[in-house]
Amino acid sequence: MGNFYTIFRAGKGRRSKCKRKPVDSFNNPAGTHEGIKTVGADNLCDFSTDSNLCICIVTWNMNGKVSYEDLVELVGSNRRFDLLVVGLQEVPRNNLARLLQDALVESHELLGKAIMQSLQLYVFGPKNSDLFTKELKVDKHSVGGCGGIIRRKKGAVAIRINYKGFRMVFITCHLSAHARNVEERNSQCRHISHSLFSKYWNPYARPAQITVWLGDLNYRLQGINTHPARNLIQRNLHGLLKSKDQLLQEAERGQIFNGYCEGTLTFKPTYKYNIGSSNYDTSYKVRVPSWTDRILFKIEDPDKISASLHCYESIDDIYSSDHKPVRAQLCLKVCKY
């Protein structure tokens, strides 16, 4: 499956190998099924005092197109965060790292990247923040067939980073499409989770404290046709569609993402739009709108680290793709007793 494991540090050029426990967020002892916990987003965050580390997380399926203006909108003008994590799917053949760095030049610099063709993950930090980075490693896991030929590579890339003493893993993925392939997506999630960093597993290594998944997970709405779904969205009643969401259903069944958290789905489904507009698909397929693009996180020991979510939203002013980007802000604090 093309596993690799190297260190990339922007501007350093250093590469090394090191053993590490695999990222496994799906195996749980019998009887401990929790599903996905929905958490509210508190939009008030005192960046300077309330948290030890604030992370802005963005995922976007680009549909093979990019403009610098869209990337400026993607990263936003409010830079009240320490780390910016950007997961991209269906990336065109452009130097996205350079374009993103240009958009962030006044405040942040590239710390690391993980790339598998059209599936890409970037971590940016404040200037000179490499002084706080004790570890940065990357890995990848591909699934499916020849999707990379048409710039739709399926699988996941990951970055493991120790920043300011927080041991974190970020995973961006692009899973199989179509509503009928829910079991295939479940299997891909499990294989990705079991495989990342597994070749260099070290039983004595300290595990990650925070794991974040972001990407086009491709789970759809099930049990409702497109016109009733669109009618609810048009009436601003899209919250009623959450009971039809495959991702939440499969997590509730104990298949995936046990013990993870996700913000409330207050924004409209992010797929599929007519390119260049905020109108849902009017092609002959007339797809059912779905929350394909998601951000989920898990704190391994909530007694030691607390997490608060300060936004979970779609970025609706970007029109170049058939997906809307999704953004979250997650703030971490060491618990003191």
Image: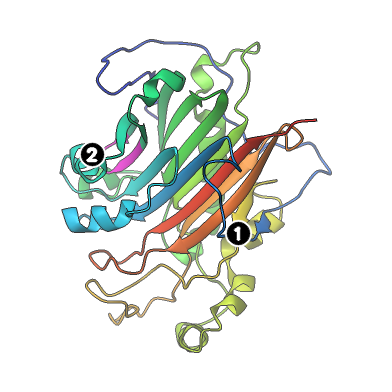
Q: Give the overall secondary structure of the magenta segment.
A: strand
Q: Which label's residue is closer to the chain start, 1 or 2? A: 1
Q: Is residue 17 magenta?
A: no
As displayed, is residue 229 above or below residue 214? below
At 50% from the left and 18% from the top, the residue drawn is 199
At 44% from the left and 47% from the top, the residue drawn is 57
- Viewer-proximal residue among 75 and 113: 75
The reply to whether residue 27 is visible in this rendering is yes
As displayed, is residue 25 above or below residue 267? above
Q: Callout 2, which amino acid?
A: Val
Q: Position of residue 62 (x, y in %)?
A: 27, 56
At 38% from the left and 47% from the top, the residue drawn is 79
Quick one: quadrant of the C terminus? top right
Q: Which residue is mark 1?
A: 42
Q: Which residues are magenta?
A: 115-122
For label 1, the crowd category at 10 Å Cα-Cα, with few meaning under 14, some 14 to 19 and many 20 or more, is: few
Residue positioned most to the right: 31
Q: Is residue 272 left or right of residue 97?
A: right
Q: Callout 1, which amino acid?
A: Asp
Q: Cα distance, mark 1 to mark 2?
A: 28 Å
Q: Position of residue 231 (x, y in %)?
A: 48, 89
Q: Is residue 118 magenta?
A: yes
Q: Is residue 133 left or right of residue 25?
A: left
Are the residues tagged 1 and 2 within 8 Å (C-beta)? no
Quick one: quadrant of the N terminus? top left
At 49% from the left and 64% from the top, the residue drawn is 180
Give residue 84's quadrant in the image.
top left
- The circle on residue 105 is 2
As displayed, is residue 326 above or below residue 287? above
Q: Regarding mark 1 in the picture, which secondary structure is present there?
A: loop
- Viewer-proximal residue among 235 and 258: 235
Give residue 288's quadrant in the image.
bottom left
